[in-house]
Amino acid sequence: MNPIILSSKKIAGLLFKEQVKWTIWFLSFMFVIYIVVVSFASGPHSSFIDLANFSNGSSAIYMLVIGILTTSTFFYYYMQQGAARKNFFFGAALTSVLLAVVITIMLILLTFILEFAAGWTGWNIHGQEFDFTSSISEFIYIFVSFIIMHLIYFLIGWMIGLTFYRLGWLYGLLSIACSILLLAITGILIEVTHFSFFTNMIHLPAFIAFPLNIVLIILLFGVNYRLIKDVTVKI
Amino acid sequence: MSYSIEVNGLTVHYKNFKALDQLNFKLSSGKVHGILGRNGAGKTTLLTYLASFHKAKHGTIVIDGEDPFENERILQGTSFIYEKDNTYDYDKIDKIIKRMLYFRPYFDEAYARELVKRFKIPTNKSADQLSKGQYSALQVAIGLASRTPLTIFDEAYLGMDAPARELFYKEILLEQERHPRTILFSTHLVSEMEYLFDEVLIIDNGKVLLQETSEQLLEKGFSITGAKEDVEAFTKTLEVIYEEMLGGTKSVMVYGTLPKQEQREAVELDLEIGSLSINNLFIHLTKEEERT
């Protein structure tokens, strides 16, 4: 018997390779745009560089978009190549976690590079909203928060894409409404997120927020698996 | 290596419309099967179920002895080639071919490249820059070179010009000699490819109208031509699927076997007996269904 070529691991590898390529393009464009903006900005607004503001939420939106495209682009493609739905799901799930980690590492690296460059050129960039350089624990806290935020945004995007694909536009719109609610919850749970409606009203300590984040992630994985496991491949 | 197919009681509803109605048939492995039917007969619906793009809710599908849905082994061995939109396919042809090595265990890259060359597909272009016919030819080349035990071509020739289609048909015959597999060929352009089919399954209004080997089917169709009165008397008990008149001469097409005794009687009556093509049978059998 021939080995199964399109295993979850194999799909994860191929997806990750492709998505990292996209991510490098995305971050490169963002970096260039940021440099141009900072070069021309003057006054108090020129000091808005920090890890969260550097991407200005766009990395999260990027993950949301990749999540949406996961179904219409990647899922459709792999089904044509003879992959099983469950293998695609587990491959894409693994990729989503890896990508969330990689994009966070890239963002942090870019922030360090910017700080270094700012020190060298004399820009005033000491306006960090999030303190991630003062101690290891702070760094880990911010690092993990960003990974979780990126992962949740990806999973929400994946859910929206899958709902549109499987159930049509009406349920798709409902999934968007549901996603806004989930983003609001994410805003409460994760300090670093830019889409937060209640951050100023509710502040949850980390030991409560992190387990709740994990519950939310598991829930989203569960919903996405239910949506994909017997979905019709449209031609 | 090739897969056999067994379908039992497959029924598919789209809201109030019954696309497939209690389909029962077996397709033997290693053969080229013509899946024939008029527009909207249910061919593509059936093929999407065989390719596991849908999950069968009513009825069962067994491919190579197993349920194909979410079956890694069967899915990996099944290629489904159909008309696709290349508007958003920005990959280079070279990359598309190379990537197939990741997906199909029997993919022959050299053969794929040879076919691409013979189909005159420019390899320096990206897929979105190809014409519709060239993109179809690319899909066909990949389908042939994948050498999957079950290869499904659903109107895969759309947009391909006559020389390209001719090349495609010839390659199917050659490939069946070199690497036999189960090929399903859905088409309504029966006349130009009927010589490819080992077996024929005709679907009409979501039901199996007939399933025969090509030889059996050809033995079941006759044309009878002669004097109007003689032809009418001779075919009174036969199943006439088409008739036409020219002056006092009548020509009819008959579906069913004609025993030797009756053939002799026809000769005695000075009637001319000819054979029918699969295309003629297809046209008039599906028309007849429409009438009744």
Image (tube, coloured by chain):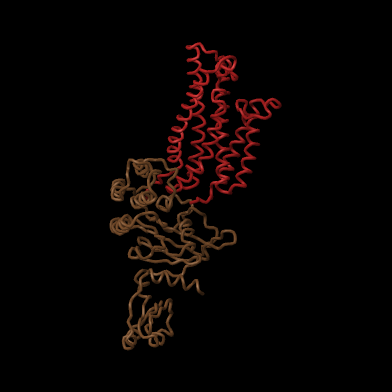
Chain colours: A red, B brown
Decide: is B117 above or below A67.
below
Please state the horizontal and vertical placement of residue A140, each as a whole percent of the image. Answer: 55, 22
Q: Is residue B228 visible?
A: yes
The count of marks equals: 0
Residue A116 is situated, as x and y percent measured from the top left of the image, at 48, 15
Q: Is residue B152 among the parts visible in the rendering?
A: no
Where in the figure is residue A186, as x and y percent of width and height?
63, 32
Query: Quadrant of the rendered structure where residue B285 is?
Result: bottom left
Which quadrant of the structure image shows residue A56? top right
Nearer to me, A197 or A124: A124
Q: Is residue A117 left or right of residue A221?
A: left
**Which x, y percent locates residue B287?**
46, 71
Of residues B269 and A85, which is closer to you in this image?
A: B269
The answer to whether residue A7 is above or below residue B7 is above
- Most extreme residue toward the front is B247
Query: Does residue B122 appear to the left or right of A56 in the view shown?
Result: left
Which residue is at a point 58% across and 45% down the rendered structure image? A163
Quadrant of the image for the N terminus of chain B?
bottom left
